Amino acid sequence: MPPSKEIAYTALACALLIGGQYVFSFVAGVEIVTLLLICFSFIFGVRNGVICAVAFSVLRCLLYGFYPTAIILYLIYYPTLATLFGVLGHVKQSTFESFPWYFALAVNVLLLGIACACAVCYGLDLIKISRIYKITVQILLWVIFTLSAGLCIAFDGLLVAKKVFKKDTANLLKLITIASFAAVCTVLFTLSDDIITPLFWGYNKTVTLAYFYTSFTVMLPQTVCTIVTVSTLFLPLTAVLEKIRK
């Protein structure tokens, strides 16, 4: 692809990220940036994905202000996200068709890890928040647990169908793999913020815990949103982007 086209497509993708974040910023916990960036990086590669991520991380400040912790977080997280899915985009289709054991193990660990974390948080009542949000958080924990466990069961079922019945399940296996990585990355985004912001501003332990519990109520719906949007829209969006790239 000519460099001029790469620049144009990267600029357009950056504009979509900013526009998408602005539009959905009015709905708490709902975001489209992860889906758009991982789809773009998956098809256009690491370089274009990272350039898009860096440009987005800086330009969004024109809308939301130049907050130091936000800039640091975005410049670390989104280029890393673009790199991860840019690398996954270079994995050959034949790999998903054969699906080696270490890929299968990684996906199971990620999905079961999310499900177990939700079960532990719910069962041990680890999230100390206001009663106003408690029921909502409990519902979201169960939703994420159900989605993660369901994806894990579906994933293992597809593997069995592939190995035993010789079914062509490569695209579905790839989709669940991408969704599991995206969900974990969404969780890591909030946890990174929970580390960067308290360290930057010098919060004490009490304030740090309060900040964590507050961000937790945002992380849960974002994780649900990521799992649902990636599971339903990743394949059609990457198919469109693949046609554009050609």
Image (cartoon, rainbow, N blue to C red):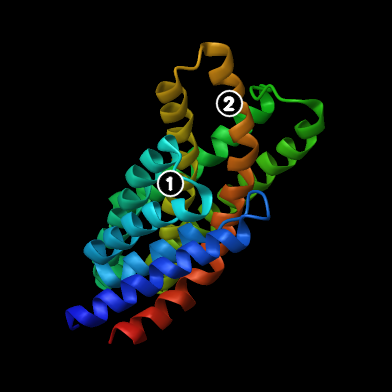
Q: Secondary structure at mark 2?
A: helix
Q: Residue at x 32, y 55 (%)?
A: 54
* Quarter of the image that includes the C terminus: bottom left
Q: Which residue is mark 1?
A: 185
Amino acid identity at mark 1:
Cys
For marks 2 and 1, give the one nearer the viewer.
2
Q: Residue furthest left?
A: 2
Residues at badges 2 and 1 in contact (C-beta under 8 Å)?
A: no
* Quarter of the image that includes the N terminus: bottom left
Q: Is residue 226 above or below residue 3?
A: above
Q: Position of residue 167 (x, y in %)?
A: 42, 75
Q: Is residue 82 left or right of residue 32?
A: left
Report how many numbered discs are placed on residues in the image. 2
Q: Is residue 161 visible?
A: no
Tag shown at residue 211:
2
Q: Is residue 20 left or right of residue 240?
A: right
Label whose residue precedes the other's in the sequence (2 or 1): 1
Q: Is residue 141 above or below residue 205?
A: below
Q: Is residue 89 visible?
A: yes
Q: Nearer the viewer, residue 226 or 69?
A: 69
Q: Position of residue 31 (x, y in %)?
A: 57, 56
Q: Nearer the viewer, residue 88 or 216?
A: 216
Q: Is residue 120 above or below residue 21?
A: above
Q: Position of residue 232 (x, y in %)?
A: 56, 69
Q: Is residue 81 left or right of residue 184?
A: left
Amino acid identity at mark 2:
Tyr
Q: Secondary structure at mark 1?
A: helix
Q: Residue at x 24, y 70 (%)?
A: 92
